[in-house]
Every structure is written in C-alpha cells, then in structure tokens.
Amino acid sequence: VTTSAVRRSSYNSKASKPDKAIDDAKAQSTTQQKAPLLPPKPQQQQSRSSGASVKSEITARKKKKTSNLAAINGKLSQSLSNIRTSDLPPQEFYTIEQLRDAARLPNTCNLLTRELYLSPQEFQQHFHMTQEEFQKQPKWKRDKAKRSLGLF
C-alpha cells in the first residue's frame, strides 16, 4: 500500500463524518427556506375531483361540435338544393346568336345557364337532346357541349 493511498483513506474517513453532517444541515435549511415557485392553481381547477368529470366534459364538447357541424351541413345542403330548384325555365327565349353575345343580353339572363333560354325546338336542334336529358348528364359533358356551341 502506498502512502498516498493511506493518506486518501485517512483523509476520507476523518472528513466524511463532519462533511456529511454539514451537508445534511444545509439540505434541511434549504428545504425549509424554499418558497413555492408557482402560484396556487385557481379554485376552479382544484375543484375537479376525478378524471371522470374531465372525460365527460370532453365528450360533451365533442358532441356539441358534432351537432354544430351537422346543423351547418344541413343548412348547406338545403341552400344547394334551393339553388338547383330555383333555376326555373325562363319566360322568354332567345336565339343561339343572341345568347352567344353576352354583352347584348338583358341583365335578367343568367350567363351560366344560357342554354335554358333556347326554345325547346332550338335546343333539340343544337344539342340533339331534350333539356331534361341534357340536365341529367355530368357537368363536364354539359360544359363541353356548351363550349362547342359558344355558350360557355
């Protein structure tokens, strides 16, 4: 055994007892003097007794959001159906040449549905189908037919 090892062991054994007592005293004094870092929680948050009430509150909020979305979807689908049914057949008819020139049409004409202002005979002549058959087609087919006639 070397002398340095003896010195270390004797130093550690002598100093360990007083240092431990000092460390314990410091630890006790710091725990007693520490002030809380965070302010106390508001009364409302402390009143919750269990996680069950939090879960029920969350499910209630989800149900409310779902019902609100359902109401919005209902109103939206109703307004869309109103738009589709509000396109009543026009009272007056125009020729295809008049319908191609949008600047000369009266303001009462809907430019997106110019084909409805054709008489049934003229519509059949140009589109080769009735207006009911035309409305049953997909939008892209209707738009393509209107483009070919210059009504889009």
Image (tube, grey):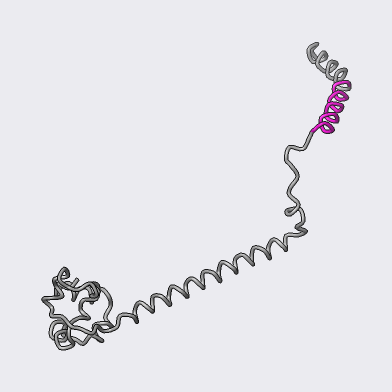
The residue range painted magenta reads 18-34
Q: Quadrant of the C terminus?
A: bottom left
At horizontal 72% and vertical 60% (from top left) the residue drawn is 51
Total marks placed: 0
At horizontal 82% and vertical 13% (from top left) the residue drawn is 7
In the rendered image, is residue 36 in sight? yes
In the rendered image, is residue 141 in sight? no
At horizontal 51% and vertical 72% (from top left) the residue drawn is 70
Where's residue 88, x and y in %? 29, 83
Magenta segment includes 104: no
Query: Which image quadrant is residue 25 in?
Result: top right
Predominant SS along the magenta part: helix
Where's residue 8, x and y in %? 80, 16
Query: Which image quadrant is residue 123 in?
Result: bottom left
- Direction top: furthest residue: 3
Q: Is residue 27 above or below residue 6?
A: below
Where's residue 132, x and y in %? 26, 86
Relative to residue 24, is residue 45 drawn left or right? left
Camera-side residue: 102 or 70? 102
Where's residue 135, x and y in %? 27, 82
- Direction left: furthest residue: 97
